[in-house]
Image: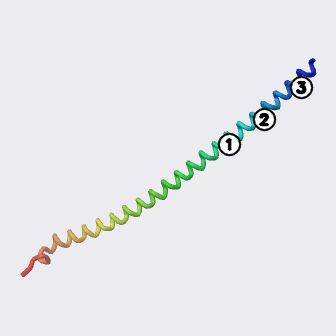
Amino acid sequence: MARAGGITKAVNMGIAVQADWENREFISHISLNVVCYVNLSESTTKTKLAKLNEKLDTLERRLELLEVQVTNATANPALFTTN
């Protein structure tokens, strides 16, 4: 009888070990997917920030041009009068 109990215990231990490995594999897959998702999100965010930076650069150049035009117009009002 003791021997049968030992076999049962060994089988139960084998099942427990198999279940543990399956749980570890599941956790590994979940962890990998989370890391991939975070990396994708960071990449998307970096791309959006780069595009936004380009738009801001364009707006800054346009603003500088307008400032020069206003300065010139203010300094030379005769350019805008008709005779």
Distance from label 1 to label 2 (Cα)?
15 Å
Residue bearing the label numbered 3: 7
Q: Are marks 1 and 3 in contact (CB under 8 Å)?
A: no
Could you tell me the amino acid type at mark 2? Answer: Gln
User: In the displayed structure, would residue 39 be above or below residue 26?
Assistant: below
Q: In the displayed structure, does residue 79 sit left or right of residue 62?
A: left
Residue plotted at (82% across, 28% down): 13
- Which-is-in-front pick, marks 1 and 3? 3
Q: Earlier in the sequence, mark 1 or mark 3?
A: 3
Please rate how many residues cluster around mark 3, counting C-alpha atoms within 10 Å: few if below 14, some from 14 to 19, many from 20.
few
Instruction: For mark 1, give the secondary structure.
Output: helix
Residue plotted at (41% across, 63% down): 54
Residue bearing the label numbered 2: 18
* Quadrant showing the N terminus: top right
Q: Which mark is residue 78?
A: none
Q: In the displayed structure, does residue 67 sit left or right of residue 13?
A: left
User: In the displayed structure, would residue 76 be above or below residue 2?
Assistant: below
